[in-house]
Image: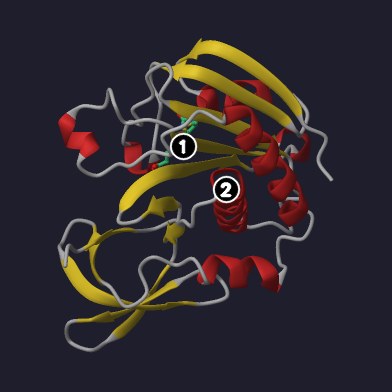
Amino acid sequence: MVNFDIRHFNTLDSTNTYLKALAQSGEKEGVVIIADKQTSGRGRRGKSFYSPEGTGLYMSILLRPDSTKVNPTLITTATAVALSVAIEEVYETKVSVKWVNDIYLGDKKLAGILTESSFSCNPDLNYVVVGIGVNLTTEYFPDEIKDIAVSLGEDRKDELVKSILAHFSLLYSDLSSPDIYRQYLERSFIIGKEIEILGENKVLGKAIGIDESFRLEVELVNKERIFLSSGEVSIKVKKE
Ligand code: BTN
């Protein structure tokens, strides 16, 4: 079990950036950084994560897993399950997971996860920082974000944090448990949907499944089947 040490801030540039600096200076596993507001919140693929005060939960967790045994994708997927279960528990609403790191409510994005890791020759300085951003209200969001984002609508941040950490701690103690895969799969948002693989060229296909290594199986337009690894590609679900 991880011993969590929760530290609150009013404003940070990014809870992930702040925690990565602490990790590099030797901070222990289990430190959790929460900010009311981020001035440079970050998402995957260099995107920014809109994080004004009073609209969301912005938190990061420092982990020091055994680098010879752990694959950071498993930490992202375990976090997706822990976050989904926690939201469902606290807000009594069912959510789904869009491969690989987005949580959806209906057909809009509710939350995202940004996992950043560093593995070097000094094992004492190896770390994984998992960042979680959840929309609590979209009232003040600009229209272009409002169109694609959804929120929980009520601030039960303290309960939510408690529940996320409790579920995460349990899953983190056995990252290869088939239970994580089962819970991830049963919430999958994209299986059976038409998708676009984001990259230099536009590639279209249909999401067929997710294997036990959390690779996405896609059938391309020419019927060829390929497997996508989470670290390499992102996808966009096509509107029906
Ligand atoms: C994504 O949607 O691509 C991931 C979003 C992750 C946002 C969270 S908010 C807390 C933590 N700090 C950051 O700068 N990003 C993550």
- Which is more toward the observer, 176 or 53? 53
Q: Helix, strand or loop at disc 1?
A: strand
- Local crowd size for mark 1, using a 10 Å CA cut-off: few (<14), some (14–19), many (≥20): many
Label 2 belongs to which residue? Answer: 83
- Which is more toward the observer, 226 or 34? 34
The picture places residue 237, in percent across and down from the top left corner, at: 25, 62
Report the coloring of the rendering. secondary structure
Q: The residue under label 1 is which amino acid type?
A: Val
Give the spatial CA distance, label 2 vs label 1.
9 Å
In the depicted structure, whether residue 191 falls above or below residue 224 = above
Question: Under 8 Å from ligand 1: the CB of mark 1?
Answer: no
Note whether residue 145 is visible: yes
In the image, what residue occupies the spot 17% across and 62% down?
Answer: 239
Q: Quadrant of residue 193?
A: bottom left
- Local crowd size for mark 2, using a 10 Å CA cut-off: few (<14), some (14–19), many (≥20): many
Q: Helix, strand or loop at disc 2?
A: helix
Q: The residue under label 2 is which amino acid type?
A: Leu
Task: Determine whether, in the image, residue 164 is placed left or right of residue 97.
Answer: right
Label 1 belongs to which residue? Answer: 134
Q: For ligand 1, which image quadrant applies?
A: top left
